Amino acid sequence: MGAQPIPTEGPQRASARGREDDAAMRELRQQARTAPSLGAGELEALLERSARGDRVSQDRLVAANLRMVIRLAEARQERGLSVPDLVQEGSLGLVEAVRTFATEGSSDFAAFAESKVGAQMDAAIEAEAAAVREGEQLVAAASDYERVEIMLRKTLRRAATEAEIAQKLEWTVERTRYVAQVVADARRRHDEELLAFIDPDSIDIDDLIDRE
């Protein structure tokens, strides 16, 4: 059996995730529309109280700036993270902006907040890209492991040891052991997925016994 790569989302799961994202964005946009705008002089007072740790003031500022967070998130869609995920990340940056504005020496909260929100989103996008690259490298390593494992089994006429596989691949034994576990887990998941499609009622136990 070939080594199975790390599973990706199937069409049905991706479709369900898409519907969940759409519902989440509808709710977020509704929240942004209904959040009351800040009155004259209210921003400074809220920032001062937020700097002292007042949670109500922080929440008020976050709600008032949610539309900005959504705008920056939508400008970064198609870059590896969904818009709801980007809004979540951007909200963390907004909270950080609210908490630190008074001590950063900036005089323009809107520009300061956009900078923090954008930086938080960009960092999350880069982290996701790094995780994807790592996954792709792991899939390639699993394929190399299985190819060498099969080749050595044919050559040696027995199962190769970790050390023998490691030597052939020019890996450490520790890396070989780790990739071997990944391959074993992928095979197990593949077998479980196949079993999920088997209808027990369609299996003739007597016929199976007769064949043995």
Image (cartoon, grey):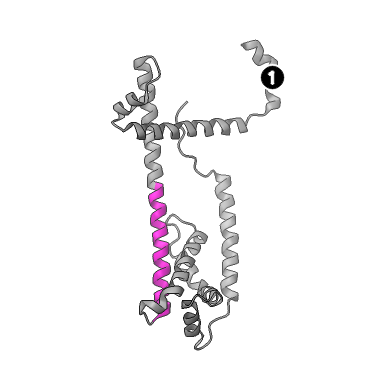
Place residue 28 in its image quadrant. bottom right
Q: Position of residue 104 (x, y in %)?
A: 36, 76
Q: Which class describes the residues within 10 Å of circle 1: few (<14), some (14-19), or many (20+)?
A: few
**Residue range corresponding to the magenta coloring:** 108-132
Which residue lies at the image location 45% right of the left edge and 28% below the top edge?
2
Does residue 77 lie above or below 166 as drawn? below
- Left or right of 156: which side holds 38? right
Q: Is residue 109 magenta?
A: yes
Does residue 4 lie above or below 12 as drawn? above
Does residue 41 lie above or below 27 as drawn? below
**Which residue occupies the foreground of this view, 20 or 160?**
160
Q: Residue reaching furthest bottom?
A: 40
- Left or right of 23: which side holds 142? left
Element class at badge 1? loop
Q: Position of residue 54 (x, y in %)?
A: 53, 76
Inspect the image, locate mark 1, and give the three-letter code of the amino acid beneath it.
Answer: Asp
Which residue lies at the image location 71% right of the left edge and 26% below the top edge?
201
Q: Is residue 76 magenta?
A: no
Q: Position of residue 66 (x, y in %)?
A: 52, 71
**Which residue occupies the foreground of this view, 134 or 97?**
97
**Which residue occupies the foreground of this view, 164 or 9?**
164
- Please state, as top left, top right, bottom left or bottom right, where the C terminus lies in the image: top right
Which residue position holds label 1? 204
Which residue lies at the image location 31% right of the left edge and 33% below the top edge?
172
**Which residue occupies the foreground of this view, 14 or 119?**
119
Q: Position of residue 11 (x, y in %)?
A: 55, 45
